[in-house]
Image: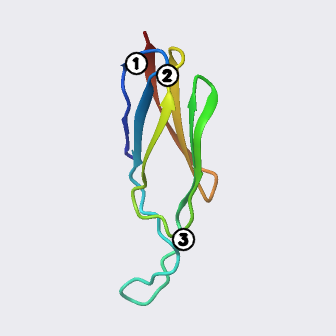
């Protein structure tokens, strides 16, 4: 899986920062058929979570209506230097993670 994170490397204490996260994933609903009429099995990410220095700052549940390559934008307040950890989990329990360090001045 390809994961892309856009978040600042540094921020001032108390600053609200914008975070963008994307994962490349087909998000197949299970409702479509291939060219031969065979059902394409469901394959979706069901959960996303972002934690900041160990505390959850954003979480979402995904359903079959979410488009391929889910892209999220959200905000949090910079409080202390720490690590942002992004985790996506699919319907089978497989997960993918990425981290980004944030330095608060």
Q: Position of residue 54 (x, y in %)?
A: 63, 25
Q: Tell which of 11 and 25 is nearer to you.
A: 11
Which residue is pictured at 59% across the width and 45% down the height? Answer: 59
Dots 3 and 2: beta carbons under 8 Å? no
Q: Position of residue 94 (x, y in %)?
A: 59, 50
Mark 3 or mark 2, which has the lower sequence index? Answer: 3
Q: Which residue is mark 3?
A: 42
* Location of residue 73 by image quarter: top left
**Secondary structure beneath disc 2?**
loop
Q: Is residue 6 left or right of residue 96?
A: left
Label ID, residue 11: 1
Quadrant in which the C terminus is drawn: top left
Q: Is residue 13 above or below residue 56?
A: above
Q: CA distance from mark 1 to mark 2?
A: 6 Å
Q: CA distance from mark 1 to mark 3?
A: 40 Å
Q: Which residue is mark 2?
A: 78
Q: Is residue 25 left or right of residue 89?
A: left
Residues packed near mark 3 inside 10 Å, few (<14), some (14 to 19) or many (20 plus): some
Q: Is residue 14 above or below residue 85?
A: above
């Amino acid at each position: 899986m390809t994961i892309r994170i856009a978040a600042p490397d540094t921020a001032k204490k108390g600053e609200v920062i914008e975070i963008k996260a994307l994962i490349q994933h087909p998000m197949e609903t299970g409702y479509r058929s291939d060219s031969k009429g065979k059902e394409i099995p469901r394959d979706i990410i069901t959960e996303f979570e972002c934690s900041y220095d160990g505390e959850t700052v954003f979480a979402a549940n995904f359903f079959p209506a979410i488009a391929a390559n889910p892209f999220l934008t959200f905000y949090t307040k910079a409080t202390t230097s720490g690590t942002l950890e992004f985790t996506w989990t699919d319907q089978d329990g497989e997960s993918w993670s990425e981290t980004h360090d944030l330095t608060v001045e």
